[in-house]
Amino acid sequence: MASASVTVRVPAKVNLQLSVGPPRPDGFHELATVFHAVSLFDDVVARRVEPGAGISLTISGEGATFLPTDRTNLAWAAAELMADRAGVAADVAIHLNKGIPVAGGMAGGSADAAGALVACDQLWQLGTSRSELMELAAQLGSDVPFALHGGTAIGTGRGEQLMSVLARGTFQWVFALAEGGLSTPAVYAECDRLRGGGIVREPYISDNLMQALRAGDSVLLGKALHNDLQPAALSLRPSLRNVLELSDDYGALGGIVSGSGPTCAFIANDDDQSLDLAVSLTAAGVCRTVKRAVGPVPGARIIG
Ligand code: C5P
């Protein structure tokens, strides 16, 4: 018998490398990126409702008040797209419990879309294939397929074409969350502006990064982190420079702006060092809050 509700847990991502090419005719940028899923999660609950009730959306958790609860929310759009594709009525009550920072460069909105696809598929008993889920995800946003995939993966195209990466071991992360968010399109536009129309090299994945992942070597990984959007995020939010510099003093193995920011991500050697770093960053008062996490973790999965 079909259950009355489905809960899906979806991880945040950090880009270990984000290599950004020139803008394409469709307005997106060609990317070569390494996505890495970390243990900050959103839970997406899809609950059965009366036939004809339509879609409704509620949100709890950090930053919930800043998010729309109508069809402009990507989770709502995902439920609508799934119903359209399957030819079923879009009747569902969706609830998002946010653990991923809002507008933080960690793909929280994409996580919610991925979660809504998986939850509605299960609630409506559609049996959608993995490849079809991936295709729907790519229609919703560049980072949505990775939220389904999880783990560590190379992303090309606009980020939606994925290839798994074999990574050994687990890495310890500390995330410094900023006050307020940054708009992803604004950060890409600033990146183009700073480049001033000069020649931009083809996006690429560095060998050092791949080696660090294959070896499970946090020290090498710390040195190999790279984000082409970082200068743009720092230009729009100069205070992030303090966070990155301080974490260096506090012994982080490497630090980077996560995606389009403003969250900053730091890698630590082990659990103890990660705790020290988190405490020091908190005490320095340079960010809104600090969260610790590990990666890689699996993509969207049903937990109840
Ligand atoms: O795909 P998504 O809706 O997440 O993208 C949000 C915005 O980020 C796009 O409208 C675009 O401005 C920018 N973007 C980009 N190139 C990419 C991915 C995103 O320019 N590869």
Image: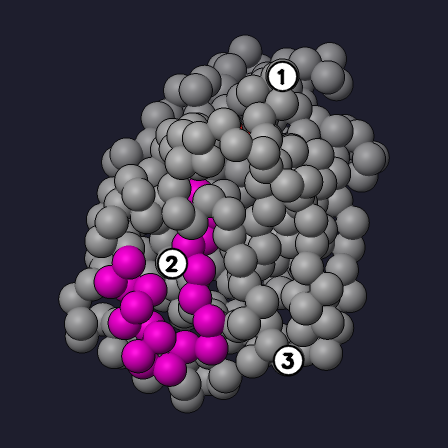
Task: In the displayed orientation, state which residue is furthest to the front.
Answer: 198
Q: Which residue is mark 2?
A: 264
Q: Quadrant of residue 31?
A: top right
The disc, 2 or 1, on the residue closer to the chain's N-terminal end is 1
Vertical placement of residue 219 versus 183, above or below: below
Q: Nearer the viewer, residue 129 or 247?
A: 247
Q: Which residue is mark 1?
A: 25
Vertical placement of residue 205 versus 155, above or below: below
Tell me the kind of residue under disc 1.
Pro
Tell me the kind of residue under disc 2.
Cys
Q: Quadrant of the N terminus?
A: top right
Q: Quadrant of residue 148?
A: top right
Q: Which residue corresponds to the image point at 68% horizontal and 68% vertical from the top-left? A: 208
Q: Which residue corresponds to the image point at 45% horizontal and 53% vertical from the top-left? A: 258
Residue 2 in view, yes or no: no
Q: Is residue 13 left or right of residue 207?
A: left
